[in-house]
Image (cartoon, grey):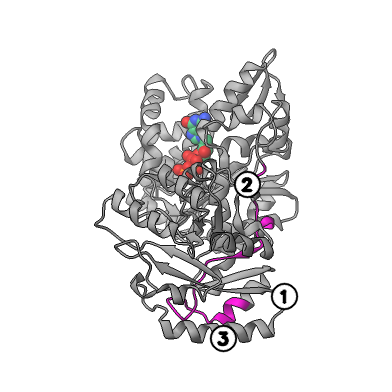
Amino acid sequence: MAAAADIVRARGITTDSELGPLFDSPPPGADAEVLKRLRQMYEAGGWVLVESGIADMPADLRWLFESGAVTLEQLAAVHRALGATSAADLAAAIHDQRMSGAAGLDATVESAIASALPTLRTHIPRIPLGRAIGIAEPILHHVRSIPGVQWAEPAGSLRRGEELIGDIELIVSTDRAGEAIDEFLRGQDVTRTLHRSPRRLYVLIDRVQVGIRFPEPDNAGASLLYLTGSAAHFDALRAHAQSIGWRLTSRGLHAAADGALRPAPTEAEIYSALGLPWVPPEIRQGEDEVAIAARGELPVLVASEDIRGDLHMHSTYSDGRDSIDAMVEACRALGYEYMAITDHSQHSAATRSLTVDGVKRQADEIAALRERFDDITILHGCEVDILIDGTLDFPDRVLEQFDIVLASLHERAGQEGDKLLKRYLAAMRHPLVTMITHPTNRLVPYREGYDLDYDRLFEAAAETKTILEVDGAPAHLDLDGALARRAVAAGAMVSVDSDSHRTDVLERQMYLGIVTARRGWVEPRHVANTRSIADLRALIAAKR
Ligand code: DGT
Protein backbone atom coordinates (compact mmCIF):
# COMPACT_ATOMS: atom_id res chain seq x y z
CA MET A 1 0.00 0.00 0.00
CA ALA A 2 2.98 2.30 -0.41
CA ALA A 3 1.18 4.12 -3.22
CA ALA A 4 -1.73 4.82 -0.89
CA ALA A 5 0.65 6.28 1.68
CA ASP A 6 2.06 8.60 -1.00
CA ILE A 7 -1.40 9.78 -2.01
CA VAL A 8 -2.42 10.44 1.56
CA ARG A 9 0.82 12.20 2.44
CA ALA A 10 0.75 14.34 -0.70
CA ARG A 11 -2.67 15.59 0.32
CA GLY A 12 -1.46 16.34 3.87
CA ILE A 13 -4.18 14.08 5.25
CA THR A 14 -3.67 13.17 8.89
CA THR A 15 -7.05 11.83 10.01
CA ASP A 16 -9.43 9.31 8.50
CA SER A 17 -12.21 11.86 8.42
CA GLU A 18 -10.27 14.03 5.95
CA LEU A 19 -10.31 11.25 3.37
CA GLY A 20 -13.79 11.85 1.90
CA PRO A 21 -12.65 14.56 -0.57
CA LEU A 22 -9.86 12.27 -1.79
CA PHE A 23 -12.41 9.90 -3.25
CA ASP A 24 -14.43 12.74 -4.74
CA SER A 25 -11.42 14.09 -6.61
CA PRO A 26 -8.69 11.45 -6.90
CA PRO A 27 -5.25 12.75 -7.81
CA PRO A 28 -4.40 12.37 -11.51
CA GLY A 29 -2.68 9.08 -12.24
CA ALA A 30 -3.63 7.49 -8.93
CA ASP A 31 -3.74 3.70 -8.98
CA ALA A 32 -7.42 2.70 -9.21
CA GLU A 33 -6.85 -0.52 -7.20
CA VAL A 34 -5.19 1.38 -4.38
CA LEU A 35 -8.00 3.90 -4.30
CA LYS A 36 -10.58 1.11 -4.27
CA ARG A 37 -8.90 -0.54 -1.27
CA LEU A 38 -8.65 2.80 0.53
CA ARG A 39 -12.35 3.42 -0.06
CA GLN A 40 -13.25 -0.03 1.27
CA MET A 41 -11.30 0.62 4.44
CA TYR A 42 -12.79 4.06 4.77
CA GLU A 43 -16.32 2.78 4.37
CA ALA A 44 -15.65 -0.03 6.82
CA GLY A 45 -15.17 2.61 9.48
CA GLY A 46 -11.82 4.23 8.96
CA TRP A 47 -8.30 3.18 9.87
CA VAL A 48 -7.19 3.87 6.33
CA LEU A 49 -4.12 5.73 7.44
CA VAL A 50 -2.84 2.77 9.35
CA GLU A 51 -3.68 0.35 6.59
CA SER A 52 -1.99 2.58 4.08
CA GLY A 53 1.28 2.25 5.92
CA ILE A 54 1.43 5.70 7.42
CA ALA A 55 0.97 4.10 10.81
CA ASP A 56 0.56 7.39 12.56
CA MET A 57 -1.16 6.28 15.67
CA PRO A 58 -0.73 6.62 19.40
CA ALA A 59 2.39 4.81 20.59
CA ASP A 60 0.64 2.15 22.68
CA LEU A 61 -1.48 0.98 19.74
CA ARG A 62 1.47 1.08 17.40
CA TRP A 63 3.49 -1.12 19.74
CA LEU A 64 0.62 -3.56 20.13
CA PHE A 65 0.64 -4.01 16.37
CA GLU A 66 4.40 -3.96 15.86
CA SER A 67 4.99 -6.50 18.62
CA GLY A 68 2.75 -8.91 16.73
CA ALA A 69 0.19 -9.14 19.53
CA VAL A 70 -2.65 -8.17 17.16
CA THR A 71 -3.17 -7.65 13.44
CA LEU A 72 -4.03 -4.31 11.93
CA GLU A 73 -7.61 -5.45 11.37
CA GLN A 74 -7.92 -6.43 15.02
CA LEU A 75 -6.39 -3.17 16.12
CA ALA A 76 -8.78 -1.25 13.89
CA ALA A 77 -11.68 -3.19 15.41
CA VAL A 78 -10.50 -2.40 18.95
CA HIS A 79 -10.22 1.24 18.08
CA ARG A 80 -13.62 1.37 16.35
CA ALA A 81 -15.54 -0.63 18.92
CA LEU A 82 -14.00 0.82 22.06
CA GLY A 83 -12.49 4.13 20.98
CA ALA A 84 -9.29 2.88 22.64
CA THR A 85 -6.17 4.95 22.02
CA SER A 86 -3.94 3.87 24.88
CA ALA A 87 -2.93 0.97 27.11
CA ALA A 88 -5.00 2.52 29.90
CA ASP A 89 -8.15 2.32 27.71
CA LEU A 90 -7.44 -1.29 26.84
CA ALA A 91 -6.85 -2.22 30.49
CA ALA A 92 -10.12 -0.54 31.45
CA ALA A 93 -12.07 -2.28 28.67
CA ILE A 94 -10.74 -5.66 29.76
CA HIS A 95 -11.40 -4.97 33.43
CA ASP A 96 -14.96 -3.81 32.73
CA GLN A 97 -15.55 -6.76 30.37
CA ARG A 98 -16.28 -4.48 27.44
CA MET A 99 -13.76 -5.99 25.03
CA SER A 100 -14.81 -9.53 24.24
CA GLY A 101 -18.09 -9.47 22.37
CA ALA A 102 -17.64 -5.94 21.00
CA ALA A 103 -17.98 -5.83 17.21
CA GLY A 104 -15.16 -7.72 15.51
CA LEU A 105 -13.52 -8.77 18.78
CA ASP A 106 -13.39 -12.15 20.39
CA ALA A 107 -11.76 -13.86 23.35
CA THR A 108 -8.56 -14.52 21.35
CA VAL A 109 -7.99 -10.81 20.74
CA GLU A 110 -8.78 -10.03 24.35
CA SER A 111 -6.35 -12.58 25.68
CA ALA A 112 -3.61 -11.48 23.23
CA ILE A 113 -4.02 -7.89 24.40
CA ALA A 114 -4.25 -8.87 28.06
CA SER A 115 -0.97 -10.74 27.88
CA ALA A 116 0.76 -7.93 25.95
CA LEU A 117 -0.40 -5.16 28.31
CA PRO A 118 1.90 -5.79 31.30
CA THR A 119 5.02 -5.29 29.17
CA LEU A 120 3.61 -2.80 26.69
CA ARG A 121 4.65 0.38 28.50
CA THR A 122 8.13 -0.91 29.19
CA HIS A 123 8.76 -0.77 25.43
CA ILE A 124 7.95 2.92 25.12
CA PRO A 125 11.10 5.08 25.37
CA ARG A 126 10.94 7.15 28.55
CA ILE A 127 11.97 10.75 29.05
CA PRO A 128 13.22 12.48 32.21
CA LEU A 129 10.65 14.31 34.36
CA GLY A 130 12.38 17.67 33.80
CA ARG A 131 12.08 17.38 30.02
CA ALA A 132 8.47 16.24 30.24
CA ILE A 133 7.58 19.22 32.44
CA GLY A 134 9.46 21.51 30.06
CA ILE A 135 7.22 20.33 27.21
CA ALA A 136 3.96 20.05 29.16
CA GLU A 137 4.06 23.38 31.01
CA PRO A 138 3.73 25.75 28.03
CA ILE A 139 1.11 23.44 26.51
CA LEU A 140 -0.94 23.54 29.71
CA HIS A 141 -0.54 27.28 29.87
CA HIS A 142 -1.87 27.57 26.32
CA VAL A 143 -4.73 25.09 26.81
CA ARG A 144 -5.87 26.82 29.99
CA SER A 145 -6.22 30.05 28.04
CA ILE A 146 -8.54 28.53 25.39
CA PRO A 147 -12.13 29.79 25.74
CA GLY A 148 -14.48 27.20 27.24
CA VAL A 149 -11.74 25.29 29.06
CA GLN A 150 -12.70 24.84 32.70
CA TRP A 151 -9.51 23.17 33.82
CA ALA A 152 -6.55 21.31 32.35
CA GLU A 153 -4.21 18.97 34.23
CA PRO A 154 -1.47 16.51 33.37
CA ALA A 155 -2.22 12.86 34.12
CA GLY A 156 -0.20 9.66 34.51
CA SER A 157 3.38 9.41 35.64
CA LEU A 158 3.96 13.10 34.90
CA ARG A 159 1.35 14.18 37.44
CA ARG A 160 2.67 11.69 39.96
CA GLY A 161 6.15 13.19 39.51
CA GLU A 162 7.93 10.00 38.52
CA GLU A 163 11.52 10.48 37.43
CA LEU A 164 10.99 8.93 33.97
CA ILE A 165 7.86 9.50 31.92
CA GLY A 166 6.43 7.28 29.18
CA ASP A 167 4.24 9.86 27.47
CA ILE A 168 2.59 13.15 28.21
CA GLU A 169 -1.12 12.86 28.77
CA LEU A 170 -3.32 15.86 29.56
CA ILE A 171 -6.95 16.04 30.59
CA VAL A 172 -8.92 19.11 29.60
CA SER A 173 -12.41 19.71 30.94
CA THR A 174 -14.48 21.51 28.31
CA ASP A 175 -17.84 21.26 26.61
CA ARG A 176 -16.37 22.76 23.44
CA ALA A 177 -13.86 20.04 22.58
CA GLY A 178 -13.81 20.52 18.78
CA GLU A 179 -13.12 24.24 19.04
CA ALA A 180 -10.52 23.63 21.73
CA ILE A 181 -8.72 21.12 19.49
CA ASP A 182 -8.74 23.52 16.53
CA GLU A 183 -7.49 26.34 18.71
CA PHE A 184 -4.82 24.10 20.19
CA LEU A 185 -3.53 23.06 16.77
CA ARG A 186 -3.45 26.68 15.63
CA GLY A 187 -1.29 27.71 18.58
CA GLN A 188 1.19 24.83 18.81
CA ASP A 189 4.22 23.77 16.86
CA VAL A 190 3.00 20.23 16.22
CA THR A 191 5.37 17.92 14.32
CA ARG A 192 2.63 15.41 13.45
CA THR A 193 -0.93 14.62 14.37
CA LEU A 194 -1.16 10.95 15.30
CA HIS A 195 -4.86 10.79 15.99
CA ARG A 196 -7.81 13.10 16.15
CA SER A 197 -11.33 12.22 17.17
CA PRO A 198 -14.09 14.40 18.65
CA ARG A 199 -12.67 14.33 22.19
CA ARG A 200 -9.09 13.17 21.73
CA LEU A 201 -5.96 14.45 20.14
CA TYR A 202 -2.55 12.80 19.94
CA VAL A 203 0.32 14.82 18.56
CA LEU A 204 4.09 14.71 18.44
CA ILE A 205 5.72 17.79 19.89
CA ASP A 206 9.47 17.99 20.20
CA ARG A 207 9.67 14.24 19.43
CA VAL A 208 7.45 13.38 22.41
CA GLN A 209 3.88 12.06 22.19
CA VAL A 210 1.34 14.36 23.80
CA GLY A 211 -2.15 12.89 24.20
CA ILE A 212 -4.96 15.22 25.18
CA ARG A 213 -8.43 14.15 26.20
CA PHE A 214 -11.30 16.57 26.35
CA PRO A 215 -13.94 14.86 28.52
CA GLU A 216 -17.36 16.37 29.23
CA PRO A 217 -17.01 18.65 32.26
CA ASP A 218 -19.72 16.72 34.13
CA ASN A 219 -17.48 13.72 34.62
CA ALA A 220 -13.99 14.97 33.74
CA GLY A 221 -12.81 14.29 37.31
CA ALA A 222 -13.29 10.57 36.71
CA SER A 223 -11.00 10.62 33.63
CA LEU A 224 -8.36 12.54 35.53
CA LEU A 225 -8.52 10.15 38.47
CA TYR A 226 -8.22 7.00 36.37
CA LEU A 227 -5.54 8.32 34.05
CA THR A 228 -3.45 9.77 36.86
CA GLY A 229 -3.08 6.29 38.34
CA SER A 230 -1.02 4.71 39.51
CA ALA A 231 -2.79 1.50 38.54
CA ALA A 232 -2.07 0.24 42.07
CA HIS A 233 -3.59 3.36 43.65
CA PHE A 234 -6.66 3.07 41.46
CA ASP A 235 -7.02 -0.61 42.37
CA ALA A 236 -6.78 0.27 46.08
CA LEU A 237 -9.45 2.96 45.61
CA ARG A 238 -11.60 0.47 43.70
CA ALA A 239 -11.38 -2.01 46.58
CA HIS A 240 -12.19 0.72 49.10
CA ALA A 241 -15.18 1.82 46.97
CA GLN A 242 -16.48 -1.72 46.82
CA SER A 243 -16.19 -2.10 50.59
CA ILE A 244 -18.56 0.83 51.10
CA GLY A 245 -21.10 0.08 48.39
CA TRP A 246 -19.78 1.83 45.27
CA ARG A 247 -18.32 0.49 42.05
CA LEU A 248 -15.39 2.49 40.72
CA THR A 249 -14.43 2.11 37.05
CA SER A 250 -12.37 4.16 34.62
CA ARG A 251 -15.65 5.93 33.78
CA GLY A 252 -16.32 7.03 37.33
CA LEU A 253 -18.25 6.09 40.39
CA HIS A 254 -21.33 3.92 39.94
CA ALA A 255 -23.96 3.16 42.56
CA ALA A 256 -23.66 -0.56 43.31
CA ALA A 257 -27.45 -1.00 43.29
CA ASP A 258 -28.35 0.26 39.80
CA GLY A 259 -24.97 1.08 38.25
CA ALA A 260 -25.95 4.76 37.85
CA LEU A 261 -22.94 6.98 37.24
CA ARG A 262 -22.41 9.72 39.80
CA PRO A 263 -21.21 12.87 38.00
CA ALA A 264 -17.75 14.00 39.08
CA PRO A 265 -16.61 17.31 37.58
CA THR A 266 -13.47 17.08 39.73
CA GLU A 267 -11.50 14.30 41.37
CA ALA A 268 -12.21 15.67 44.82
CA GLU A 269 -15.87 14.72 44.36
CA ILE A 270 -14.97 11.07 43.93
CA TYR A 271 -12.63 10.99 46.92
CA SER A 272 -15.23 12.78 48.97
CA ALA A 273 -18.02 10.37 47.97
CA LEU A 274 -15.68 7.60 49.08
CA GLY A 275 -15.27 9.30 52.47
CA LEU A 276 -11.65 10.19 51.72
CA PRO A 277 -9.67 13.42 51.55
CA TRP A 278 -8.20 14.25 48.14
CA VAL A 279 -4.92 12.34 47.84
CA PRO A 280 -2.00 14.31 46.34
CA PRO A 281 -0.94 12.66 43.03
CA GLU A 282 2.70 12.33 44.14
CA ILE A 283 1.75 9.77 46.78
CA ARG A 284 -0.73 7.80 44.66
CA GLN A 285 1.66 4.89 44.60
CA GLY A 286 -0.66 2.13 45.76
CA GLU A 287 1.26 1.56 48.97
CA ASP A 288 -0.59 2.58 52.12
CA GLU A 289 -2.02 5.95 51.10
CA VAL A 290 -5.65 4.88 50.73
CA ALA A 291 -5.68 3.19 54.15
CA ILE A 292 -4.00 6.22 55.75
CA ALA A 293 -6.45 8.57 54.00
CA ALA A 294 -9.35 6.43 55.24
CA ARG A 295 -8.07 6.85 58.81
CA GLY A 296 -7.97 10.63 58.25
CA GLU A 297 -4.20 10.69 58.81
CA LEU A 298 -2.85 12.03 55.50
CA PRO A 299 -0.15 14.62 56.19
CA VAL A 300 0.01 18.03 54.53
CA LEU A 301 2.98 17.70 52.17
CA VAL A 302 5.65 20.31 51.63
CA ALA A 303 4.80 22.72 48.79
CA SER A 304 6.53 25.48 46.83
CA GLU A 305 5.03 28.16 49.07
CA ASP A 306 6.76 26.65 52.11
CA ILE A 307 10.28 27.02 50.72
CA ARG A 308 12.10 30.12 51.97
CA GLY A 309 15.46 29.68 50.31
CA ASP A 310 17.75 27.52 48.22
CA LEU A 311 20.84 26.12 49.96
CA HIS A 312 22.68 24.51 47.06
CA MET A 313 23.85 26.24 43.87
CA HIS A 314 27.02 26.86 41.92
CA SER A 315 28.63 29.90 40.33
CA THR A 316 31.54 30.58 38.00
CA TYR A 317 33.85 29.95 40.99
CA SER A 318 33.31 26.29 40.17
CA ASP A 319 31.34 24.65 37.36
CA GLY A 320 28.37 27.04 37.34
CA ARG A 321 27.62 29.08 34.22
CA ASP A 322 26.60 32.31 35.95
CA SER A 323 28.23 34.80 38.31
CA ILE A 324 27.32 35.02 41.99
CA ASP A 325 25.78 38.40 41.19
CA ALA A 326 23.45 36.83 38.60
CA MET A 327 22.51 33.96 40.93
CA VAL A 328 21.64 36.46 43.67
CA GLU A 329 19.49 38.52 41.31
CA ALA A 330 17.65 35.38 40.19
CA CYS A 331 17.03 34.21 43.77
CA ARG A 332 15.71 37.68 44.68
CA ALA A 333 13.36 37.47 41.71
CA LEU A 334 12.08 34.15 43.05
CA GLY A 335 11.30 35.86 46.34
CA TYR A 336 13.67 33.79 48.47
CA GLU A 337 14.53 35.06 51.94
CA TYR A 338 17.93 33.40 51.76
CA MET A 339 20.25 31.46 49.48
CA ALA A 340 23.63 29.76 49.69
CA ILE A 341 26.39 29.83 47.11
CA THR A 342 28.03 26.42 47.41
CA ASP A 343 30.81 25.83 44.90
CA HIS A 344 32.74 22.57 44.54
CA SER A 345 36.08 21.86 46.16
CA GLN A 346 39.06 20.63 44.16
CA HIS A 347 38.57 16.85 44.31
CA SER A 348 35.06 16.99 42.93
CA ALA A 349 36.24 16.45 39.35
CA ALA A 350 34.04 19.37 38.35
CA THR A 351 35.26 21.20 35.27
CA ARG A 352 36.29 24.11 37.54
CA SER A 353 36.52 24.14 41.32
CA LEU A 354 36.90 26.54 44.18
CA THR A 355 40.48 27.08 45.32
CA VAL A 356 41.53 28.24 48.79
CA ASP A 357 42.40 31.58 47.17
CA GLY A 358 39.03 31.62 45.48
CA VAL A 359 37.30 31.30 48.85
CA LYS A 360 38.72 34.63 49.96
CA ARG A 361 37.79 36.39 46.72
CA GLN A 362 34.36 34.87 46.85
CA ALA A 363 33.90 36.05 50.44
CA ASP A 364 34.76 39.62 49.39
CA GLU A 365 32.35 39.45 46.47
CA ILE A 366 29.56 38.15 48.69
CA ALA A 367 30.28 40.84 51.31
CA ALA A 368 29.84 43.50 48.61
CA LEU A 369 26.57 41.94 47.47
CA ARG A 370 25.29 41.90 51.06
CA GLU A 371 25.93 45.64 51.12
CA ARG A 372 23.87 46.05 47.95
CA PHE A 373 20.90 43.88 48.88
CA ASP A 374 19.11 43.87 52.18
CA ASP A 375 16.13 41.83 50.96
CA ILE A 376 17.95 38.50 50.81
CA THR A 377 20.46 36.79 53.10
CA ILE A 378 23.39 35.41 51.11
CA LEU A 379 25.10 32.51 52.83
CA HIS A 380 28.63 31.80 51.78
CA GLY A 381 28.90 28.04 51.55
CA CYS A 382 30.68 25.27 49.71
CA GLU A 383 30.06 21.73 48.55
CA VAL A 384 33.15 20.02 49.84
CA ASP A 385 34.19 16.57 48.68
CA ILE A 386 34.48 13.74 51.16
CA LEU A 387 37.90 12.23 50.49
CA ILE A 388 38.78 8.55 50.39
CA ASP A 389 39.65 8.47 54.12
CA GLY A 390 36.49 10.32 55.17
CA THR A 391 38.27 13.65 55.70
CA LEU A 392 37.18 16.75 53.83
CA ASP A 393 38.69 18.46 50.80
CA PHE A 394 39.30 21.77 52.63
CA PRO A 395 41.20 22.14 55.92
CA ASP A 396 39.07 23.08 58.95
CA ARG A 397 40.56 26.58 59.04
CA VAL A 398 39.01 27.15 55.57
CA LEU A 399 35.73 25.38 56.32
CA GLU A 400 35.25 27.54 59.42
CA GLN A 401 34.99 30.60 57.20
CA PHE A 402 31.84 29.32 55.49
CA ASP A 403 28.33 30.01 56.80
CA ILE A 404 27.24 26.55 55.65
CA VAL A 405 29.16 23.46 54.56
CA LEU A 406 27.61 20.85 52.28
CA ALA A 407 29.56 17.61 51.89
CA SER A 408 29.33 15.10 49.09
CA LEU A 409 30.81 12.00 47.58
CA HIS A 410 31.49 12.22 43.90
CA GLU A 411 32.76 8.65 43.68
CA ARG A 412 31.52 7.35 40.37
CA ALA A 413 32.45 3.74 40.83
CA GLY A 414 34.75 1.41 42.56
CA GLN A 415 33.96 1.38 46.27
CA GLU A 416 31.67 -0.99 48.08
CA GLY A 417 28.77 0.23 50.15
CA ASP A 418 30.34 -0.19 53.57
CA LYS A 419 33.40 1.86 52.61
CA LEU A 420 31.22 4.63 51.19
CA LEU A 421 29.04 4.52 54.31
CA LYS A 422 32.13 4.84 56.54
CA ARG A 423 33.15 7.95 54.62
CA TYR A 424 29.67 9.40 54.97
CA LEU A 425 29.62 8.66 58.71
CA ALA A 426 33.00 10.30 59.21
CA ALA A 427 31.83 13.42 57.36
CA MET A 428 28.56 13.55 59.28
CA ARG A 429 30.42 13.47 62.58
CA HIS A 430 32.37 16.55 61.51
CA PRO A 431 30.87 19.51 63.40
CA LEU A 432 31.22 21.84 60.43
CA VAL A 433 29.26 19.63 58.02
CA THR A 434 25.65 20.81 57.88
CA MET A 435 24.35 18.72 55.00
CA ILE A 436 25.07 15.69 52.82
CA THR A 437 24.10 16.45 49.21
CA HIS A 438 22.53 13.96 46.77
CA PRO A 439 23.24 11.03 49.13
CA THR A 440 22.85 8.13 46.67
CA ASN A 441 24.82 9.92 43.94
CA ARG A 442 22.76 8.28 41.21
CA LEU A 443 22.61 9.63 37.68
CA VAL A 444 19.10 9.24 36.26
CA PRO A 445 18.68 7.24 34.03
CA TYR A 446 22.27 6.09 33.58
CA ARG A 447 23.67 5.15 36.98
CA GLU A 448 22.03 3.52 40.00
CA GLY A 449 22.63 5.02 43.41
CA TYR A 450 25.13 3.58 45.89
CA ASP A 451 24.25 0.24 47.33
CA LEU A 452 24.71 0.98 51.02
CA ASP A 453 22.89 0.63 54.33
CA TYR A 454 20.61 3.64 54.09
CA ASP A 455 18.87 2.95 57.38
CA ARG A 456 22.24 3.33 59.09
CA LEU A 457 22.86 6.54 57.15
CA PHE A 458 19.47 7.97 58.16
CA GLU A 459 20.00 7.03 61.80
CA ALA A 460 23.41 8.72 61.77
CA ALA A 461 21.92 11.82 60.15
CA ALA A 462 19.37 12.04 62.96
CA GLU A 463 22.02 11.39 65.67
CA THR A 464 24.56 13.87 64.33
CA LYS A 465 21.90 16.41 63.29
CA THR A 466 23.19 16.41 59.72
CA ILE A 467 20.67 17.42 57.09
CA LEU A 468 20.17 15.13 54.07
CA GLU A 469 19.40 16.64 50.73
CA VAL A 470 16.57 16.09 48.30
CA ASP A 471 18.41 17.42 45.27
CA GLY A 472 16.18 18.65 42.43
CA ALA A 473 18.68 18.46 39.56
CA PRO A 474 16.90 16.28 36.96
CA ALA A 475 19.73 13.72 36.86
CA HIS A 476 19.81 13.48 40.68
CA LEU A 477 16.31 13.71 42.23
CA ASP A 478 18.22 12.36 45.19
CA LEU A 479 17.12 11.30 47.80
CA ASP A 480 14.27 9.87 45.78
CA GLY A 481 10.77 9.69 47.23
CA ALA A 482 11.07 6.22 48.71
CA LEU A 483 14.35 7.00 50.47
CA ALA A 484 13.21 10.44 51.60
CA ARG A 485 10.21 8.81 53.27
CA ARG A 486 12.50 6.44 55.17
CA ALA A 487 14.88 9.28 56.07
CA VAL A 488 12.23 11.46 57.69
CA ALA A 489 10.67 8.44 59.39
CA ALA A 490 14.10 7.83 60.96
CA GLY A 491 14.06 11.39 62.32
CA ALA A 492 16.45 12.95 59.81
CA MET A 493 15.89 16.45 58.56
CA VAL A 494 16.03 17.12 54.81
CA SER A 495 16.70 20.17 52.69
CA VAL A 496 15.10 20.59 49.27
CA ASP A 497 17.50 22.33 46.92
CA SER A 498 17.96 23.06 43.25
CA ASP A 499 21.70 22.31 42.85
CA SER A 500 21.52 24.81 39.99
CA HIS A 501 24.46 25.59 37.78
CA ARG A 502 22.59 28.38 35.94
CA THR A 503 20.10 31.07 36.85
CA ASP A 504 17.44 29.80 34.46
CA VAL A 505 17.02 26.41 36.15
CA LEU A 506 16.75 27.67 39.75
CA GLU A 507 12.97 27.60 39.78
CA ARG A 508 12.45 24.40 37.75
CA GLN A 509 14.97 22.37 39.74
CA MET A 510 13.57 23.54 43.05
CA TYR A 511 10.16 22.45 41.78
CA LEU A 512 11.54 19.02 40.82
CA GLY A 513 13.01 18.73 44.31
CA ILE A 514 9.68 19.57 45.90
CA VAL A 515 7.83 17.04 43.76
CA THR A 516 10.40 14.41 44.76
CA ALA A 517 10.09 15.31 48.45
CA ARG A 518 6.31 15.11 48.18
CA ARG A 519 6.67 11.61 46.74
CA GLY A 520 8.48 10.88 50.01
CA TRP A 521 5.60 12.17 52.15
CA VAL A 522 7.86 14.98 53.34
CA GLU A 523 6.10 17.67 55.36
CA PRO A 524 7.23 21.29 55.90
CA ARG A 525 8.37 20.44 59.44
CA HIS A 526 10.90 17.94 58.04
CA VAL A 527 12.53 20.50 55.74
CA ALA A 528 15.36 22.76 56.89
CA ASN A 529 14.74 25.43 54.25
CA THR A 530 11.16 26.02 55.29
CA ARG A 531 12.67 27.61 58.43
CA SER A 532 13.34 31.28 58.96
CA ILE A 533 16.94 32.36 58.46
CA ALA A 534 17.34 32.72 62.24
CA ASP A 535 16.16 29.15 62.80
CA LEU A 536 18.33 27.89 59.97
CA ARG A 537 21.39 29.61 61.43
CA ALA A 538 20.51 28.07 64.80
CA LEU A 539 20.36 24.61 63.19
CA ILE A 540 23.82 25.12 61.68
CA ALA A 541 25.23 26.53 64.91
CA ALA A 542 23.78 23.71 67.04
CA LYS A 543 26.12 21.24 65.37
CA ARG A 544 29.23 23.40 65.33
P1 DGT B 1 3.95 5.94 31.81
O1 DGT B 1 3.17 6.75 30.83
O2 DGT B 1 4.32 4.59 31.30
O3 DGT B 1 5.10 6.68 32.37
O4 DGT B 1 3.03 5.61 33.09
P2 DGT B 1 1.56 6.05 33.40
O5 DGT B 1 1.28 5.80 34.83
O6 DGT B 1 1.34 7.43 32.90
O7 DGT B 1 0.74 4.95 32.62
P3 DGT B 1 -0.21 5.00 31.35
O8 DGT B 1 -0.01 6.24 30.55
O9 DGT B 1 -0.05 3.68 30.68
O10 DGT B 1 -1.65 4.97 31.99
C1 DGT B 1 -2.16 6.09 32.65
C2 DGT B 1 -2.91 5.64 33.85
O11 DGT B 1 -4.01 4.79 33.48
C3 DGT B 1 -2.13 4.81 34.85
O12 DGT B 1 -1.29 5.58 35.66
C4 DGT B 1 -3.26 4.18 35.60
C5 DGT B 1 -4.26 3.87 34.50
N1 DGT B 1 -4.02 2.49 34.06
C6 DGT B 1 -3.30 2.08 33.02
N2 DGT B 1 -3.28 0.72 32.96
C7 DGT B 1 -3.99 0.29 34.01
C8 DGT B 1 -4.33 -1.00 34.50
O13 DGT B 1 -3.94 -2.04 33.96
N3 DGT B 1 -5.10 -1.03 35.63
C9 DGT B 1 -5.51 0.09 36.26
N4 DGT B 1 -6.23 0.02 37.38
N5 DGT B 1 -5.20 1.31 35.81
C10 DGT B 1 -4.45 1.41 34.70
**What separation in Å lies between label 3 and label 2 (alpha carbons)?**
35 Å
Helix, strand or loop for disc 3: helix
Residue behind label 2 places its C-beta within 8 angstroms of ligand 1: no
Picture coordinates of residue 517, whole percent (x, y): 55, 50
Residues 86 and 155: in front is 155
21 vs 2, left or right, is right
Answer whether residue 497 is magenta in the image. no
Q: Which residue is drawn at 57% across and 63% down?
A: 540
Query: Seen from this angle, which residue lies furthest top?
Result: 257
Near mark 2 (Cα within 10 A), the count class, few <14, some 14-19 or many ≥20, is some
Q: Residue at x 46, y 46 (%)?
A: 458
Residue contact at pointers 3 and 2, CB within 8 angstroms: no
Picture coordinates of residue 471, whole percent (x, y): 49, 58
Residues 286 and 267: in front is 286
Asked if 505 appears above or below 456 in the picture, the reply is below
Residue behind label 3 places its C-beta within 8 angstroms of ligand 1: no
Q: Which amino acid does the dot numbered 2 rest on?
A: Glu
Q: Which residue is drawn at 37% across and 71% down?
A: 393
Q: In which quarter of the image is residue 319?
A: bottom left
Near mark 1 (Cα within 10 A), the count class, few <14, some 14-19 or many ≥20, is few
**What separation in Å lies between label 1 and label 3 (alpha carbons)?**
17 Å
Q: Earlier in the sequence, mark 3 or mark 2?
A: 3
Q: Which amino acid does the dot numbered 3 rest on?
A: Glu
Picture coordinates of residue 289, whole percent (x, y): 58, 33
Q: Which amino acid does the dot numbered 1 rest on?
A: Asp
Residue contact at pointers 2 and 1, CB within 8 angstroms: no
Q: Which mark is residue 375?
A: 1
Q: Name the residue under label 2.
A: 523
Q: Name the residue under label 3.
A: 365
